[in-house]
Image (cartoon, helix red, strand yellow):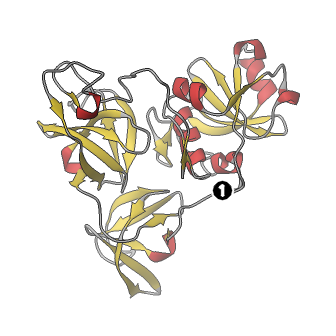
Amino acid sequence: MTRQAAPASLDPRLHAYRPDLADARLRSRVAAPRYAEARPARVIAGRTPLRRAPEPTAPIDTFCHYGEGVAVFEEAGGYAWSQARLDDYVGYIAARDLAAGEAPGPAHFVVPLGAHLYGEPDLRSPAIDLLPRHSRVHVVEAGLVTRGTEYARLYGGGFVPLSCLSPTAPCSPDLAAAAALYLGCPYLWGGRCLLGLDCSGLVQQAFLDLGVIVARDTDLQRETIGVPVAASGAADLAPGDLIFQPGHVMIYAGAGTVIHADGATMQVRRDELARLMRARRLDFAAVSVRRCSLPPV
């Protein structure tokens, strides 16, 4: 897994500091009355919102998925002030959705867009959660067969169809193919799975299929992914190029089309780029293009 470089500035989205408390690793850079050492934890819910404040109605900036690691700096009032290991995003996660420490043993990964977690190894039993693609799970028992379907029992509880798991992370041949997996999924601010994605969440998940970790928000992606490309029209674009306009990002899919999580129509869709730009009164002078050269998956 490779990671795109982060901006040099001390962005509060990516560095854990508040007026009363800061990450101990920032001691030489941030003045605070208290510092906290990070405590490792992992997400044990299919997805859990990362909020800007420790309140159930606080804005959601992103979601963390099952098995992803977080660093916890403080727990109070049912929330953990945390930093996501995947992309360094800082915020508040419901403490009930976290477990302390790392899960033991080798990992498996959810390969389909999602896999139901069952309370019993039986497809007729109630599904208790949905684990998104790339969820990292730890199998403690396999060979549990009910009506011809084999299940795996997971560390921490629950059962997943074994056919949904792989010892290697899921991958796609290229960025556009990875994004196309989510066509038709609903738009959701902060989302990054089949239950809903925003535009930068789609880009982040598509890159994850290529083994690359990128920043979460569009402005950070524009600053850190690949290199800028001068483009005056679709002829200057290559499949996988990212097209940024203020507050939005699209993936060029080739043949004059883009894939994006569109807040206007509230879904992940494929659009003809020229028609879309005309409809939204855009031209190439108003967008920026970034290109990331990646080795074959």
The residue lying furthest to the front in this view is 28
For the point 26% across and 40% down, the residue is 93
Give, as a three-letter code, the residue at label 1.
Ser
Q: Is residue 44 above or below residue 176?
A: below
Q: Nearer the viewer, residue 89 or 226?
A: 226
- State which quadrant residue 118 falls in: bottom left
Q: Nearer the viewer, residue 84 or 178?
A: 84
Circle 1 residue: 172
Q: Nearer the viewer, residue 238 or 265?
A: 238
For the point 30% across and 68% down, the residue is 104
- Of the 4 image quadrants, the one containing the C terminus is bottom right
For the point 51% across and 39% down, the residue is 197
Relative to 20, 224 lies left or right: right
Q: Is residue 91 above or below residue 169?
A: above
| Helix, strand or loop at mark 1 | loop
Q: Residues within 10 Å of mark 1 (few under 14, many from 20)?
A: some
Relative to 131, 268 lies left or right: right
Q: x, y percentage for residue 145?
A: 40, 87
| Residue 230 visible | yes
Q: Nearer the viewer, residue 81 or 11?
A: 11
| Residue 264 visible | no
Q: x, y percentage for residue 77?
A: 11, 36
Relative to 60, 297 lies left or right: right
- State which quadrant residue 270 falls in: top right
